[in-house]
Amino acid sequence: MSFDPATLKYDANGLIPAIAQDELSGEVLMMAWMNAEAVTKTLNNGRVTYWSRSRQAFWVKGESSGHLQHLVDFRVDCDRDCLLIIVRQTGPACHTNRRSCFYTAVRNGDEVELMAPEA
Amino acid sequence: MSFDPATLKYDANGLIPAIAQDELSGEVLMMAWMNAEAVTKTLNNGRVTYWSRSRQAFWVKGESSGHLQHLVDFRVDCDRDCLLIIVRQTGPACHTNRRSCFYTAVRNGDEVELMAPEA
């Protein structure tokens, strides 16, 4: 069946959450948002492109930092309201220079930092 | 540092997205939503509890299906507006009886089904 980005379910702001997962380690790197045009751009050129809610603009991941995400596989969930993007990640995914944005764990009621910024 | 669920950033509906990842396979199983009380319940009793937007009620994952999610690790992202829940999943995570909700891939413009419902 041919895929049409318009068949995804977007929220009231026209956005859908997109989870980025590293193709090799399986690590969940980040979650950001796409609109229908960002979905199309990502599929067409293989550079993962989000919609920045703070800047209200397209956000080609790594365009300024060099920490690009290359699309490896694009997945849609059962409700068509969430995306899983398998990526080849160059450098750290997080703006704090950590490999993943999910570097804080909650264990026994305390916050624990799991990874340091890369050099 | 002690963790307080009130320090997370919830959306206008008081919800935060929570990604569930299988502890063993690393597979991303599903994404659903929590409110502050669901976060507290999940941390307190180790049974992953979401907030059902359709039913407007707490949703202890697997309570009716038996496909429970046991909390293994609870992670917060850099912006504190997304959660990653590492889980021990009993049975399929998806209501379609598939292991993961992300069973549809988009490849060369077509939708491809990656896994079948479990028996």
Image: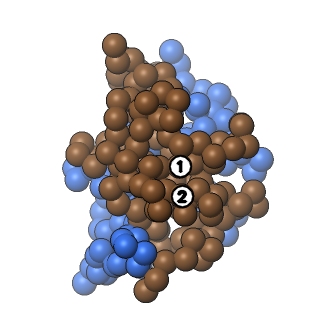
Chain colours: A brown, B blue
Q: Disc 1 is attached to a residue of which chain?
A: A
Whether B59 is drawn above or below B103: the answer is above
Q: Secondary structure at mark 2?
A: helix
**How far across and how far down the image is residue B8, in percent?**
63, 33
Which class describes the residues within 10 Å of circle 1: few (<14), some (14-19), or many (20+)? many
Callout 2 amino acid: Lys
Say which mark, if any, is on residue A41: 2
Q: Which residue is mark 1?
A: A49
Query: Tags 1 and 2 in contact by the CB under 8 Å rule?
Result: yes
Callout 1 amino acid: Thr
In the figure, is residue B106 to the left or right of B38?
left
**How far across and how far down the image is residue B28, in percent?**
36, 55
What residue is at 53 percent from the left and 43 percent from the top? A60
Q: Disc 2 is attached to a residue of which chain?
A: A
Q: Quadrant of residue B109?
A: bottom left
Q: Are marks 1 and 2 on the same chain?
A: yes
What residue is at 63 percent from the left and 46 percent from the top? A58
What residue is at 41 percent from the left and 65 percent from the top? A75
Whether B107 is drawn above or below A38: the answer is below
**How far across and how far down the image is residue A104, in percent?**
44, 27
